[in-house]
Image (spheres, rainbow, N blue to C red):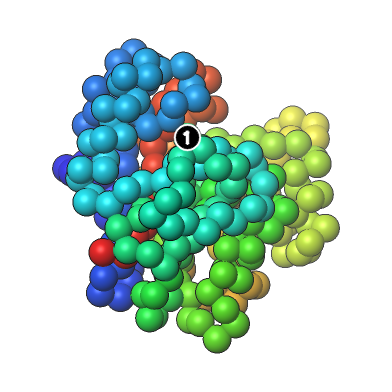
Amino acid sequence: MSGWLVPDWPAPPGVHALCTTRAGGVSAGSYRGLNLGDHVGDAPADVAANRALLRDAIGARPVFLQQVHGTQVATLDASTPDGGPADACTTTASDIACTIMVADCLPVLFTDETGRRVAAAHAGWRGLAAGVLERTVECFGAESRVMAWLGPCIGPDAFEVGDEVKAAFEAAAPEAARCFKPAGKPGKWLADLAGLARQRLHAAGVTQLHGNDSAEAWCTVHNPLLFFSHRRDRVSGRFAACIWRG
């Protein structure tokens, strides 16, 4: 689909990935474009049409999770229904797309050099601090050479957080302090969500990192024509990152 993002990374043959944008779709108003979220107030028929468009475009079935900002990793197969509570998913099956919906949080896609397994994770700050990326990497096994693609998320000049967020990351890794800068208000910081994810992935042994480098082009808040953003609009649709074996 024109206007969607296709990861530029050395995934092995047979592994496919993309990230939707607002391009395409039938939703209107605050959800204008390809809203894939069925929990944000959009017309159910429009969401169903958008999800069917995505499925037809990729030739695989996207499995949509109920994302709860936790660390649960769901294993998907052909019988897995939509709506299971989890913030990451993995599969070795063909034609099943691990799918993460976002509108400021960070979607991360995974595979390894063999391409026998794919995975996707939803990294808002709570899940990221709690270890959702590390849990997802563990699915591949200790001997695997895992690679990750980081999708669009709220950028480091737009993500204002409190002291508790900074403390949560620094408690696990003091170097996380480099990903925070003062926001100009007492107790407030600007956080680099993608930068924090890169730190956590490096520490988990993932050295092949691609995609979001914290530049403004990846920021959901600052690119309203491309991306939905809850922080920017409050009433907002959701876009999705998908990875599947074909």
Q: Amino acid at mark 1?
A: Ala
Q: Quadrant of residue 7?
A: bottom left
Q: Quadrant of residue 236?
A: top left
| Quadrant (top left/top right/bottom left/bottom right) for the N terminus | top left
Give the class, few, some or many, for how many residues have Cα within 10 Å of label 1's Cα (few <14, many ≥20). many
Q: Quadrant of residue 138?
A: bottom right
Return the x and y of residue 205 as percentages of the image width and height.
59, 77
Q: Is residue 210 left or right of residue 33?
A: right
Return the x and y of residue 241 as percentages of the image width and height.
39, 48
Return the x and y of residue 2 as percentages of the image width and height.
16, 42
Q: Is residue 200 visible?
A: no
Q: Which residue is mark 1?
A: 103
Q: Quick one: which residue is furthest to the left in this view?
A: 2
Q: At 80% from the left edge and 40% from the top edge, which residue is drawn?
A: 163
Q: Is residue 110 visible?
A: yes
Q: At 50% from the left edge and 25% from the top edge, which residue is drawn?
A: 39
Above-or-below relation of 143 to 102: below
99 or 129, which lies in front? 99
SS at circle 1: loop
116 or 131, which lies in front? 116
Return the x and y of residue 35 as percentages of the image width and height.
35, 28
Q: Is residue 166 left or right of residue 21?
A: right
Above-or-below relation of 12 to 91: below
Q: At 80% from the left edge and 41% from the top edge, which residue is drawn?
A: 164
| Quadrant (top left/top right/bottom left/bottom right) for the C terminus | bottom left
